[in-house]
Amino acid sequence: MVDYKIYKTGSGYDVFYQEIHHGGGIRWAPEFRNYFEKNSIRCNTLVEWCCGPGYIGFELLTSGFCEKLVLHDINKEVFLDVEQTLSRLPQKFSDKVEIIHSNTLSSVTGCVDCIVGNPPHVDVLDPSTPALPFYNDPPILYSDPGWQIHKNFFNDACKKITKDGFLLLLENGYYSDLSTFLEMGSEVGLELTSIQTSHPKFWFMRGVV
């Protein structure tokens, strides 16, 4: 029997997850929600990239910040958690959720208004990377060798965001530097800016085409 844990969204709905799929999103989903609320953001289609159990996406959907939610992840195992959540959500929300198991955003149909995510934060090929305190976690949660996952994402995202859309990623200052991502974005036509979160070593990276 699967040992599910529960994250409760700000609007009072349960998001089910297994500890092996945690990924830290529980800490940050409320901050995504606060960002959307503070900036009065409402959108039609929202993609949660590297969604894991979908903490961020379900937080935003059930709080009314998007009309449709696309949950996108390379790890098909996390969708067992997602299905558990969907089975308990009211139909008015579950009918608005699409699941995509893929390693590229090109699998998303058409263009979208917003892409959010809490992606892997560590270039494990960089010898200067500090020691990892979460070495017992599955590497799929934190490892981005040579920042290739980010590079592929930015390349795809610039083709998927609508004219007035944007992306919002959580990044980790312990293991990355903003300039690394600014350069990646510039190469594909994305204008990236940083926004401080409540933690001094974490920031949101907002991007527009």
Image: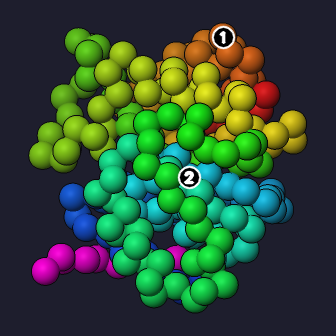
Would residue 101 appear left or right of 115 to someone viewing this image?
A: left
Q: Which residue is mark 2?
A: 48
**Residue extent of the magenta highlight:** 1-9
For residue 194, above or below residue 72: above
Amino acid type of the residue tagged 1 in the rendering: Glu
Would residue 40 appear left or right of 176 to someone viewing this image?
A: right
| Quarter occupied by the N terminus | bottom left
Q: Distance between the Cα atoms at labels 2 and 1?
A: 23 Å
- Nearer the N terminus, badge 2 or badge 1? 2
Amino acid type of the residue tagged 2 in the rendering: Glu
Mark 1: few/some/many CA within 10 Å (<14, 14-19, 20+): few
Q: Position of residue 21 (x, y in %)?
A: 28, 58
Mark 2: few/some/many CA within 10 Å (<14, 14-19, 20+): many
Viewer-side residue, 40 vs 115: 115
Viewer-side residue, 88 vs 34: 88
Would residue 180 appear left or right of 135 to someone viewing this image?
A: right
- Element type where label 2 sits in the image: strand
For residue 32, above or below residue 139: below
Residue at the spot 44% in from the left edge and 42% down from the top edge: 102
For residue 155, above or below residue 60: above
For residue 61, above or below residue 127: below
Residue at the spot 18% in from the left edge and 76% down from the top edge: 2
Residue 11 lies in what quarter of the image? bottom right
Q: Position of residue 28 (x, y in %)?
A: 49, 57
Q: Position of residue 99 (x, y in %)?
A: 51, 59
Q: Is residue 60 visible?
A: no
Q: How is the image coloured?
A: rainbow
Would residue 177 appear left or right of 108 to someone viewing this image?
A: left
Q: Which residue is mark 1?
A: 187
- Element type where label 1 sits in the image: helix
Q: Is 6 within the magenta? A: yes
Residue at the spot 51% in from the left edge and 24% down from the top edge: 152
